[in-house]
Amino acid sequence: MKRLLLTRKFPDANIAAAEAHFEVTVMDREEGLTPDEAKDALASYDAILATLGDQFSAAAFTEPTRCKMIGNFGVGYNHIDVEAARAAGVFVANTPEVVTDATADIAMTLILATCRRAGEGERLVRAGKWDGWTPTFMLGMHVTGKTLGIVGMGRIGQAVARRAHFGFEMPIKYFNRSQKSVDFPATQVETLNQLMSECDIIVVTVPGGGANTQLINREALAAMKPTGIFVNVARGDVVDEDALIDVLEAGHIAGAGLDVFVKEPFVPERLRALENAVLLPHLGTSALEVREQMGQMALDNILAWSKGETPPQLV
């Protein structure tokens, strides 16, 4: 029986499903594998069910590997050096489809919470500082009918756009490096800065790492309207976090809603201090049924490999 490492305590249903097919070791810990721990795991197990925070960098693949399959729990895999894995003869697969709706829901949560100052208002009530309703109290941005800009019109970007268009009557614009056609009203613009300047709300949904590292840089943020709202449900490294904090502190944009950060779980104190930022602890797929589906898809990829088949979600 092949040895399978689970780098976290995944949902019970996923652990039971894994144990039906493999000799399973579960690492009951919150922090991800360091590069040295990842190297040791690659030398000790036939397959690994890994996730965000596990540092399968190029350094982890410098020794011969017993492991020939990494099933990633999540759609993003910028924590795995896929080229180094391929060179070492290790397959890598992810879980793309099952995260789409849950992540899009969190994007809408952040849009609404940031535009309507929900985080700030909730803190006010909990602190006992709410003195009552007045006609001009805590005025935010009305969401319905505002122009939404999507950075990266993949599965998640399209799911956010559909919710915004059909649910909130929002005109949709998007920036995508390649030409993209969608089955709902939306306009593709030529440059990122054009999108940032023309839209009331920006949502980032591109994959992390590689060419997308700090795609949202200081210049892109400077192009936004002073009333603009910025939302990131992609990966923290897609944004120049220091530049974002600077524009928020200076009031050059109205607010930001973030579910991801550059050095999770670390969140800069300057960011935590901002009233115009809504900050979530990477809740994008945090629903039990979604996590179970992610785990099962990751296991299905590993099972396919163990049978000599091509993993369906090979990256």
Image (cartoon, rainbow, N blue to C red):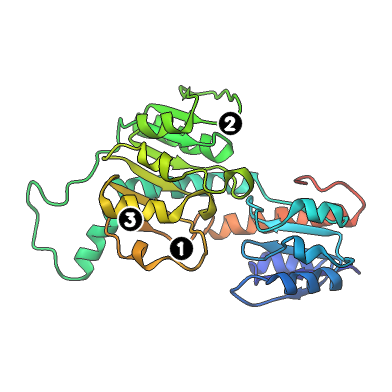
Residue most extreme to the front: 219
Nearer to us in this view, 253 or 232: 253
Residue on which the image places disc 1: 281
Q: Which mark is residue 53?
A: none
Marks 2/3: CA distance? 28 Å
Determine the CA span between mark 1 and mark 2: 29 Å
Q: Amino acid at mark 2?
A: Arg
* Closest to the observer, 200 or 219: 219
Look at the numbered disc 1 and give the secondary structure of its residue. Answer: loop
Near-viewer residue (116 or 216)? 216
Image coords of residue 59 (percent x, y): 76, 65
Asked if residue 77 lies left or right of residue 273, the reply is right
Q: Quadrant of residue 140?
A: top left
> Could you tell me which residue is drawn at 59 percent across and 49 percent down?
208
Q: Position of residue 67 (x, y in %)?
A: 85, 64
Residue 272 appears in the figure: yes
Q: Kindly report which numbered mark, 1 or 3, lies closer to the viewer in this rendering.
A: 3
Q: Which residue is mark 2?
A: 177
Pointers 1 and 2 in contact (CB under 8 A)? no
| Mark 1 Cα shell of 10 Å, populated few (<14), some (14-19), many (≥20) | few
Tell me the mark number nearer the camera, choosing from 2 and 3: 2
Find residue 266 and report its horizontal and vertical position in percent. Answer: 47, 68
**Whether label 1 touches label 3, CB < 8 Å:** no
Height in image: 304 above or below 197? below
Amino acid identity at mark 1: Pro
Q: Marks 1 and 3, Cα distance to the nearest angstrom? A: 13 Å
Task: Tell me the kind of residue under disc 3.
Answer: Ala
